[in-house]
Amino acid sequence: MIEQQIIFPHDQPAYWIVFQRDQVVVLNQQTQVNVSTRRELLLDDAHFSDVLKVAEVDNLPCLVVDLGHESLPSEQHQTVSLRSVMMNSDARLFEALARAWQATLFLRTHRFCGQCGSRMQRIDWELATQCSRCSHRCYPRISPCVIVAIRKDKQILLAQGTRHTNGMYSTLAGFVESGETLEQAVHREVFEEVGIRVTNLRYFSSQPWPFPHSLMVGFLADYAGGEITPEPKEIADAKWFDADKLPLIPPTFSIAGHLIQHTLALINEQ
């Protein structure tokens, strides 16, 4: 549960997650969130007036400070991308960072009521905002997204998105549409993106993905028919790969990486 407006002693250690714009603020030479104290962060006291607690790791709280669009507090600070910080974090800090960014983004983007335009007020017993004029209440947005690893005999289907400029191939994924089940979304996305049919669909696992507020729901599936026909606006290339001839694939910290590794293990068991 996320706690708001935490008052925290100057010299008590914690995992401090500090955001500026869409990046993470760290002390120079650092590339990850480390244990530190309020004093060691070198931030003004005013920055600690609205602290969120999003998790606990190793019995230490994970606390969030949002600088918004303010300039960096000192030359001893630098910013690094959220993605790179997450890649340097273990699973527990990964989850804390994902939650921290989604909570921060929610509070930034819900300062005014979407129904009447009045200023929103924070609810102090849960992460929500409410309009004092029309009582419209908002909670953090979560966008479900399906992601699926597809197997055909001893091969796995991998695709390169049109935005993957680094040449990476991954599993297929797409957002769930209104009125659609997760399973329907998988079948639709696969057919729309590469023109094939799948069968034996089964749930694998899920992962919060803060780019910006997705919940990735992972599935495994088997090929059922059709010829690969990439949708040109979404897919630059897609093909079946042998387990020992894989292209550049996502790291294992991501659910895509987990899906690929699990599918390869199934192939090796055949």
Image (spheres, helix red, strand yellow):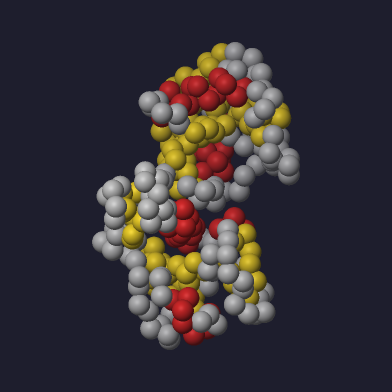
At 68% from the left and 39% from the top, the residue drawn is 163
Query: Is 221 in front, or is 39?
Result: 39
Q: Is residue 229 left or right of residue 184?
A: right
Query: Is 122 in front, or is 159?
Result: 122
- Residue 124 is situated, as x and y percent measured from the top left of the image, at 28, 63
Q: Which residue is at the far right?
A: 166
Picture quadrant of residue 7: bottom left
- Residue 62 is situated, as x and y percent measured from the top left of the image, at 42, 68
- Residue 110 is situated, as x and y percent measured from the top left of the image, at 42, 53
- Residue 164 is situated, as x and y percent measured from the top left of the image, at 69, 40
Q: How many marks?
A: 0
Q: Which residue is at the far top?
A: 226
Residue 70 at least partly seen:
yes
Query: Is 58 in front, or is 268?
Result: 58
At 47% from the left and 44% from the top, the residue drawn is 214
Above or below, comparing residue 216 to residue 95 in the picture: above
Residue 92 at least partly seen:
no
Query: Which quadrant would the N terminus be assigned to in this image?
Result: bottom left
Above or below, comparing residue 10 to residue 70 in the picture: below
Above or below, comparing residue 228 to residue 13 in the picture: above
At 65% from the left and 42% from the top, the residue drawn is 249
At 27% from the left and 50% from the top, the residue drawn is 135
Query: Is 240 in front, or is 167?
Result: 167
Query: Which quadrant would the C terminus be assigned to in this image?
Result: top right
